[in-house]
Amino acid sequence: MGEPSTWRFNKAVHSAYVHGLSIPEDEVLVEYVYVAEDGYSIHSKCRKLKHVPSEPSDVPIWSYAANFPVEDRFLQPVVIYKDPFRKGNHKLVLCEVYANDWTHAPRNFRKNCKETMSTPEATSAAPWFGLEQEYSIIDAANRPLGWPSCFMPQPNTPIHHDAVGMHKAFGRDLYEAHLFACLYAGVNISGGNAEACPGQWEFQVGPTEGVRAADDLWMARYILHRLSEEFGVAVSFHPKIIPGGAGACGGHVNFSTLAMRQDGGIKHIKAAMPLLAKTHQQFLPLCDAHGGADNVARLMGFFCTASLEFRWGVEDRDATIRIPRQVAVDKKGFLEDRRPAANFDPYLVTDALVQVVVLGHET
Ligand code: ADP
Ligand code: MN
Ligand code: MN
Ligand code: MN
Ligand code: MN
C-alpha cells in the first residue's frame, strides 16, 4: 500500500447542514441496511419518505443492484431502528434480501432463522442469545491501532484485556461512541470491554429472544462501520488479522432455553452437550464468513480459543462449549458456544443452535 490519504472533511461544516437546518418533521430519510451478496459486508442506501414509519410494513419494498448490469435484489424491511447519525425522525431499516423473483436469495439466512425460531417447539423453548462481538480497529495504512506499540504485546495476556491507559487501550473513542449510538438506535447492547490485543475491542448484545438477537448484531456492526468512517479508521471482524498467537477475534454465542434458565436447569445445559458434540463437524462451517476456512487459524485450542476437537468444560476458555462458573454454582443459566469467529453470520449460528438443541436435528 502507498501512503495513506490524510484528507478529512470538516465535521463542523457537515453538522451545520445535517443538524443545523430545520426541515419538516414528515420528511424522513430512511437508510435501508442489508447484508451484501458476499454474506459478510453490510451495505445501505437512502430513500426519503413523506411519513414517519412506525412498522416495517410502513416502509416500502425497494431493491438494489447485486450484480451489474442486470441482477436486482429486493429489499424487504424487517426492523426499524432510530438513526443515530441523522437523528430526528430519521431511521435505519434492516432489510431481508430476496432474488428478483422473490425466491430465497442465496445469502439471506434470516428467513430460515426466523422460520426455525417460529416453530412451536422453539417458541415454547424461548431461546435467548447473548452475542459477543470482538473487532479490530485498523488505521489508514491497514495496521491495527497500537501495533507496533511501545512494547510487543504477548499473545492473549491480560495486559490489554479490560485495560485502560494510553499505552494499553487504543481506540476507545470509537468503542465508546458505538455503545451510545447503539443505545440510541434501539439495539439491545449489553456491554463491552477492551480485548486482549492492542486495537482490539468487544461489545455484547442481548440476551435477546429469537431472531432479534441476530438483527441487533447486524445493525450494531453497521453502526460500528459507519462510526469508523467518522474517526478515520476502519473496523475488521476477521478472526485472525495477525498471524501467530495474538489477536484472535471471536463471536461467542451465549445460549439458553427457558428450561435451562429455571431452577435445576443445569441438567438441560448438560443434556445439550452430546447433541452439540454429535453435530460439531457440520457446525464448524457455519462459524465464519467462508465456510470455516477463516476460523481454522483462530481455533488453536489455547490462548482462550477452542480447538477443532469438541470439548466442553466449566469455566474453561479453551473449550468448545463453556459453562460459566456462576452457572455451575447456580445450577441454571446458559452455555457459551466459543466456536463462532468474529465474522460469523448470527442468523446461521443461532438457527443451528436451536435446530440442534431444541429441535434435535443433526443440522
Ligand atoms: P465472557 O467475556 O466472560 O465470555 P461476556 O460478559 O462478554 O462474557 O458475555 C456474556 C453474555 O452472556 C452477555 O452478552 C449476556 O447478555 C449473555 N447472557 C447472560 N445470561 C444469558 C442467558 N440466560 N442466555 C443467553 N445469554 C445470556
Ligand atoms: Mn443509481
Ligand atoms: Mn466477552
Ligand atoms: Mn472477548
Ligand atoms: Mn465469551
Image (tube, grey):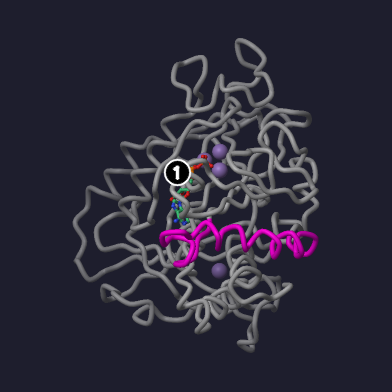
Depth check: give the residue in front, 24 or 127: 127
Depth check: give the residue in front, 220 or 205: 205
Whether residue 182 is in magenta: the answer is no
Amino acid at the residue labelled 1: Leu
**Residue 234 in view (yes/no):** no
Q: Is residue 72 left or right of residue 290?
A: left
x, y percent for residue 148: 66, 18
Q: Is residue 327 left or right of residue 336?
A: left
Residue ranking furthest to the top: 150
x, y percent for residue 192: 44, 39
**Residue 294 in view (yes/no):** yes
Ligand 4: quadrant of the figure? top right
Q: Quadrant of the C terminus?
A: bottom right
Could you tell me which residue is drawn at 66 percent across and 78 percent down?
A: 105
Q: Which residue is mark 1?
A: 227
Q: Is residue 239 shown above or below 214?
A: above
Q: Is residue 333 shown above or below 69?
A: above
x, y percent for residue 183: 33, 50
Depth check: give the residue in front, 307 or 234: 307
Whether residue 280 is in magenta: the answer is yes
Disc 1, SS: helix
Q: Which residues are magenta?
A: 255-283
x, y percent for residue 241: 71, 36
Could you tell me which residue is drawn at 19 percent across and 56 percent down?
A: 22
Could you tell me which residue is drawn at 54 percent across and 66 percent down?
A: 34
Q: Quadrant of the N terminus?
A: top right
